[in-house]
Image (cartoon, grey):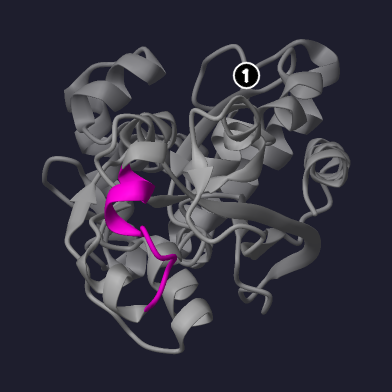
Amino acid sequence: MRLDSRHLAAFAAVLREGSFDAAARALHVTPSAVSQRIKSLEERLGRVLVRRGAPCTATEAGESLQRHAQQLALLEAEALAPFGTAAAGGGPALPLALAVNADSLATWFLPALAPLAEGARFDLLVEDQDHSHELLRQGRVLGAVTAEPQPVQGCAVRRLGALRYRAVASPAFAARHFPAGVDASSLALAPCCVFNAKDLLQERFMRQLVRRRLQPPQHRVPSTHGFVHAALHGLGWGMNPEALVQPLLASGDLVEIAPGQVLDVPLHWQHWRLDADLLRRLTASVEAAAKAALV
């Protein structure tokens, strides 16, 4: 069975852009044309592929096709590049969907993309490192920075190193909540910051220190730089990337609540097994940036 490349491009655009109207703008066609192409594709395959919503998402059947559509678009873009022609789907460059955790994005990952910025358009999805590999499994991204060492089916994995975290707070907060140092009792009462419901770094650090699972009061601060500012302003203690807080520790604006204790989070780069030069160059650039920045 052969599938119409225009139908695949419309399908991929709807999932990438989140709606039929946005996909139409990206493809420079009408929303009705996008709708008709998706309908034709679903009728040909006999399956519903797109959940109509805000945003539109792939059904289980659509996930495997989404991966195929993105791989096909990447290979087509590479084949047409010497002729100065965009791949089916329009636009000056193929958007490359990548998943990355917020702390990597705020510290070392963007320099990895800079050498490829002229020939690619990046679509970065921020996801916790313990969950980013699921976006690969769903076919939503072609590469992911992830804590998962086992390759997703059809993907290759490379170890990058570890992102080092330190537990920090303002001096006044540390003096108020940990006057005699950190122990299970003080950690259970002192407010801490978490990025979101998926963020387990604070919990892991407490278990590393006191071998117990504690549930202190929490502030949710879904921003890497906001996390640092939350500590500076005394909202709570939290695990922050060493690269971001080292200058503040040196100046005394922040202190470690458990001096010398660190949490190293191993990171991996997983990507599709695809013979594409752009993907090879991206992988090499990610590895180089990680080597310069990670433990």
104 relative to 203, above or below = above
Task: Residue 117 in the image: state x and y as whole percent.
Answer: 71, 17
Indicate the amino acid at tag 1.
Ala
Residue that appears at 44% across and 65% down:
181
* Residue 67 drawn in magenta: no
Q: Quadrant of residue 259?
A: bottom right
Residue that appears at 13% across and 40% down:
54
Q: Which residues are magenta?
A: 173-183
- Residue that extends furthest to the front in the rendered view of this protein: 180
Q: Quadrant of residue 126?
A: top left
Q: Nearer the viewer, residue 14 or 227?
A: 227
Residue that appears at 50% across and 67% down:
137
Left or right: 251 in relation to 160: left
Task: Residue 164 in the image: state x and y as whole percent.
Answer: 66, 54
91 relative to 56, above or below = above
Query: Label 1 belongs to which residue?
Result: 93
Left or right: 185 in relation to 106: left
